[in-house]
Image: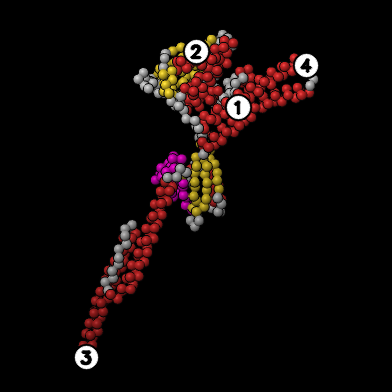
């Protein structure tokens, strides 16, 4: 009997131990599930939920767990705030920003880079950079950046110039690309360079002539007839230089925008007649018939600037129209605007030259440069004056059949306008 009761006690103890083990395992699983639930809430972007252990003897560990959970939540909040700030900053940059990972795949691309490369972020993210940049020169540059170098390169294609700055991202093996579309900057630099070269060329000829005549006069071996001729040449070249400087200063003042255009009622037909009358003697001397025709039209605009445009256009037409030719200034209302047309039956302008006719120092017939005595800036000044008052200046021409410059002026006044 004693052995039997001993066996029963052993079996009962084993059964109780098994039951306790199951209960302890279930309690541990419940605690683990509660901890996982708190972490899951944190990982999903929600606020961390406080963890409560079911047994009081776990209170110290429970508090420590909750402290760690709170710290993780605060750090994740800080990271999310930094991420939002980063996206806000790069989203409003005018420069393109692209982040590549260590495998040279696109991780981040901002809206400016989307516009520059003509792509959509979801289509190029996680793809190799060449799918977006199409720039094989980046491959060798990225090799150098991986060694810790900071580089800059330019890509030119399809009429655009892109400047790409590359820098390594420490600790990631990735590369940051900052892309600027510098097409307009490069164009302005080229225009400035051409402008300086043109000014230098325009100044060199009269200065050379002045220097040569001055040296000859200083030598003294010149009779009175030659001396008078030399002095006339010096006076003419001085006048040419003065005209060039005046036109350069005028063009600079217009482009700077320092002087705002005035607005007043301008009788365009009366203004055209006044300017044509001023050029009448010169036109007559050149054998050119200069006339004004059309309807009365009044515009609310800047009289002095419209007069400046007319002076440039009429001066240009009279100079380049042959003896026996005609120059006509026509005033007419067109589609709610006033239009001034200066037409001639001169030699005309070749089609290849028409796109450049308003550029500074551009001359269709350079062989007539010295004969006409112009600075080469008249039409450029006329265009800038037109832009300053919101007018449009265009040209129509056919080689051998003359030219017509059209100035369309907005703000045509009604009879009741003050």
Q: For the point 41% across and 49% down, which residue is it?
A: 87
Contact, CB < 8 Å: mark 1 with mark 4? Answer: no
Q: Is residue 71 placed above or below 285 in the rendered structure? A: below
User: Where are the magenta residues, as a range?
Assistant: 97-123
Quarter in which the N terminus is drawn: bottom left
Inter-mark Cα distance, 2 to 1: 30 Å
Find disc 3 in the rendering and name its residue: 2
Numbered circle sitting on residue 245 = 1
Sequence-wise, which precedes: disc 1 or disc 4? Answer: 4
Q: Secondary structure at mark 4?
A: loop
Quarter residue 68 falls in: bottom left
Quadrant location of the C terminus? top left
Q: In screen coordinates, is 376 left or right of 304?
A: right
What SS does tag 1 mark? helix
Name the N-terminal-most of marks 2 and 4: 4
- Give percent across and percent down for residue 14: 25, 80
**In the shown orientation, is residue 318 left or right of residue 232?**
left
Q: Judging from the image, what secondary structure is the residue with disc 3 in?
A: helix
Q: Nearer the viewer, residue 10 or 95?
A: 95
Whether tag 4 and tag 3 are in contact, CB under 8 A, the answer is no
Of the two numbered discs 3 and 2 in the rendering, the one whose residue sits closer to the viewer: 2
Front label number (2 vs 1): 1
Q: Nearer the viewer, residue 45 or 315?
A: 315
Query: What is the crowding at mark 3: few (fewer than 14 residues within 10 Å), some, or many (at least 20)?
Result: few
Residue 117 magenta:
yes
Name the residue rendered at 60%, 21% in the picture.
Answer: 374
Please give the label number shown on residue 223.
4
The residue to which callout 2 is attached is: 328
Q: Nearer the viewer, mark 2 or mark 4?
A: 4
Q: Is residue 29 visible?
A: no
């Amino acid at each position: 009997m004693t052995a039997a009761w001993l066996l029963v006690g052993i079996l009962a103890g084993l059964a109780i131990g098994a039951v306790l083990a199951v209960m302890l395992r279930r309690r541990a699983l419940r605690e683990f599930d509660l901890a996982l639930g708190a972490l899951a809430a944190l990982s999903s972007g929600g606020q961390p939920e406080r963890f409560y252990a079911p047994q009081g003897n776990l209170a110290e560990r429970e508090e420590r767990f909750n402290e760690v959970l709170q710290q993780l939540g605060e750090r994740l909040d800080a990271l999310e705030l930094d991420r939002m700030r980063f996206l806000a900053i790069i989203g409003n940059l005018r420069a393109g920003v692209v982040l590549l990972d260590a495998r040279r795949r696109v991780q981040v691309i901002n809206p400016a880079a989307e516009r520059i490369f003509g792509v959509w972020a979801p289509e190029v993210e996680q793809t190799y950079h060449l799918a977006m940049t199409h720039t094989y020169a980046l491959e060798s540059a990225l090799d150098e950046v991986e060694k810790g170098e900071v580089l800059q390169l330019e890509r030119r294609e399809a009429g655009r110039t892109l400047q790409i700055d590359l820098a390594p991202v420490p600790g990631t093996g990735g590369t940051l690309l900052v892309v600027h579309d510098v097409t307009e900057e490069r164009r302005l630099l080229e225009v400035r360079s051409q402008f300086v070269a043109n000014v230098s060329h325009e100044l060199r000829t009269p200065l050379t002539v002045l220097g040569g005549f001055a040296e000859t006069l200083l030598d003294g071996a010149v009779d009175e007839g030659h001396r008078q001729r030399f002095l006339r040449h010096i006076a003419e070249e001085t006048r040419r230089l003065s005209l060039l400087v005046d036109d350069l200063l005028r063009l600079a003042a217009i482009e700077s925008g320092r002087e705002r255009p005035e607005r007043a009622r301008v009788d365009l037909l009366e203004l055209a007649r006044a300017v044509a009358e001023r050029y009448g003697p010169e036109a007559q001397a050149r054998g050119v018939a200069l006339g004004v025709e059309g309807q009365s039209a009044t515009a609310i605009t800047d009289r002095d600037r419209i007069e400046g445009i007319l002076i440039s256009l009429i001066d240009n037409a009279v100079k380049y129209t042959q003896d026996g030719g005609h120059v006509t200034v026509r005033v007419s209302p067109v589609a709610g605007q006033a239009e001034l047309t200066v037409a001639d039956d001169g030699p005309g302008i070749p089609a290849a030259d028409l796109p450049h006719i308003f550029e500074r120092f551009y001359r269709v017939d350079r062989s007539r440069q010295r004969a006409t005595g112009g600075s080469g800036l008249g039409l450029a000044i006329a265009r800038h004056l037109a832009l300053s008052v919101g007018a449009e200046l265009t040209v129509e021409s056919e080689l051998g059949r003359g030219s017509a410059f059209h100035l369309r002026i907005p703000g045509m006044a009604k009879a009741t306008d003050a």
